[in-house]
């Protein structure tokens, strides 16, 4: 036998900036990010933008053109700004990645040029995949515009689109060139997406940082009323936890069987699919967190007090802990005959996506997770039942509260004695 053992080490480094008004011409951040390693000036840029952002800022393409024009010694807009649909639509139809590839090719970008992607996690995933595969990798600058993308998805090294009915089936591990978190984009974010992104912060707190969980509890009301300053703190802290994990977790490209950042995600991915993406990723993660937290409690790992705190924080932040699909036995589903909720298929699919033995994170306490390789289905089914009852009771309380705060019809005037 003859063998040459090859070993290659590659270091990646990417800055994550926090700013407001990134496209204001006097904000030099984007210019400087490119100028920092400009080996050709000006550098070519293809800019891909989320339609959801453009709908709220119709002048965005003009602002981008003006910014590039003002800093033309550094930046050259090599193609018209490309607007693509936001949300899963951009990941479900491969034509959009194709469109981005065409734009990159038409603009004759090289590996030292830039794709700048401005949008939610879905647009960043699709544009990132296109950038990573054109010329085997063009520099990607991510400008995330949702809470979830700013505190979670844009921090990582993954991109991808959906295929064969499976989330993120096609994709690559490719660290970005830089990330620019501009919180002013969040001002136009619909309430629903504002709330959804907080679930990744709860997740990060639960698996990494108990004091961050305390902070989220203390600031739940401010988050619900859209306090941008508090949200900036939450994003900054969550992003830092995420980045630190990728840098020090020892498995940035997820070669092992464990995915410590994916607490609550096995069921979340399945619920996104079962609801046909009616649930967004963050909303599904909130339910996934509730489910694995309840399992941790019922299986005897997690103290009741911690369980109560977690399960109460989610609705306090406007996040539901149950949808009908969680308890559903779909007809024709793999488990229809056994009477098990279809969501449990998510366990096998999660294992299959990762490879190796099933590894699910559970909680011993807030901030202290551990790996479990065997999930008791009866306990999981009981957990689903508990969430069903909890959500039902919560809805009743909300309804009563609403009825209570409605002004009482006043007594007809002049009839009293
Ligand atoms: N790559 C990763 O590591 C990773 C991690 C987590 C999630 N994700 C992916 O991210 C996606 C979810 O991302 P998301 O939660 O950011 O939602 P999203 O990208 O689906 O966007 C939600 C909606 O908000 C709109 N929008 C975006 N920014 C806006 C703004 N500033 N103002 C108004 N509307 C705006 C979009 O057009 C869309 O309709 C999923 O596809 C998920 O799989 C990827
Ligand atoms: Zn997630």
Image: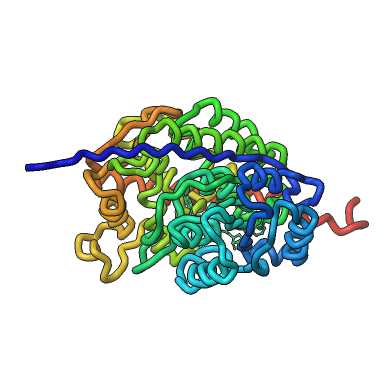
- Above or below residue 205? Residue 224 is below
Query: Can residue 304 be spotted in the picture?
Result: yes
Q: Is residue 54 left or right of residue 192?
A: right
**Residue shown at 43% from the left, 44% from the top:** 290
Residue 282 location (% of width, % of height): 51, 51
**Residue 368 lies in what quarter of the image?**
top left
**Residue shown at 51% from the left, 68% from the top:** 101
Q: Is residue 250 left or right of residue 213?
A: left
- Above or below residue 251? Residue 184 is below
Colour mode?
A: rainbow
**Residue shown at 55% from the left, 38% from the top:** 239
Residue 10 location (% of width, % of height): 40, 39
Count all numbered tags in the image, as a single digit: 0
Q: Residue furthest front?
A: 40
Query: Can residue 397 be spotted in the picture?
Result: no
- Above or below residue 370? Residue 76 is below
Residue 7 location (% of width, % of height): 28, 38
Q: Is residue 374 left or right of residue 118?
A: left
Residue 269 location (% of width, % of height): 40, 55
Q: Residue furthest bottom?
A: 95
Q: Residue furthest right?
A: 414
Q: Is residue 271 left or right of residue 192?
A: left
**Residue shown at 33% from the left, 31% from the top:** 370
Closest to the observer, 163 or 351: 163
Q: Residue furthest top?
A: 211
Closest to the observer, 191 or 120: 120
Quadrant of the image containing the N terminus:
top left
């Amino acid at each position: 036998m003859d063998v040459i053992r090859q070993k290659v080490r590659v270091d990646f480094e990417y800055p994550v900036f926090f700013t407001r008004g990134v496209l204001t011409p006097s904000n030099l951040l984007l210019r400087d990010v490119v100028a920092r390693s400009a080996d050709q000036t000006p550098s070519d840029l293809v800019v891909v933008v989320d339609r959801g952002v453009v709908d709220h800022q119709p002048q965005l393409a003009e602002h981008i053109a003006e910014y590039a024009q003002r800093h033309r010694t550094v930046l050259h807009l090599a193609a018209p700004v490309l607007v693509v649909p936001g949300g899963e639509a951009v990941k479900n139809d491969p034509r959009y990645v194709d469109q981005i590839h065409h734009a990159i090719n038409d603009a004759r970008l090289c590996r030292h040029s830039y794709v700048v992607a401005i949008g939610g996690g879905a647009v960043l995933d699709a544009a990132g995949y296109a950038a990573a595969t054109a010329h085997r990798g063009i520099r990607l600058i991510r400008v995330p515009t949702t809470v979830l993308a700013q505190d979670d998805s844009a921090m990582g090294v993954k991109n991808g689109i959906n295929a064969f009915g499976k989330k993120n089936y096609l994709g690559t591990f490719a660290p970005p060139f830089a990330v620019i978190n501009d919180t002013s984009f969040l001002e136009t974010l619909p309430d629903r997406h504002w709330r959804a992104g907080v679930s990744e912060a709860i997740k990060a707190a639960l698996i990494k940082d108990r004091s961050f969980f305390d902070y989220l509890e203390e600031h739940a009301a401010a988050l619900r009323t859209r306090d941008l300053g508090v949200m900036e703190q939450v994003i900054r802290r969550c992003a830092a936890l995420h980045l630190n994990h990728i840098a020090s977790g020892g498995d940035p490209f997820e070669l092992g069987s464990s995915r410590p950042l994916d607490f609550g995600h096995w069921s979340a991915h399945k619920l996104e699919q079962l609801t046909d993406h009616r649930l967004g990723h963050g909303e599904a993660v909130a339910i996934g967190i509730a489910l694995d937290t309840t399992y941790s409690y019922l299986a005897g790992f997690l103290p009741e007090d911690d369980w109560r705190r977690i399960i109460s924080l989610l609705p306090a932040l406007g996040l539901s802990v149950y949808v009908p699909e969680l308890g559903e036995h779909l007809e024709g589903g793999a488990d229809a005959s056994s009477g098990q909720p279809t969501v449990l298929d998510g366990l096998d699919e999660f294992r299959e996506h990762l490879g190796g033995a099933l590894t699910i994170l559970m909680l011993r306490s807030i901030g202290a997770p551990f790996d479990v390789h065997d999930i008791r289905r009866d306990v999981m089914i009981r957990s689903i039942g508990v969430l069903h009852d909890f959500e039902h009771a919560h809805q009743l309380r909300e309804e009563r509260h609403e009825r209570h705060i409605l002004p009482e019809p006043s007594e007809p005037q002049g009839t009293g004695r």
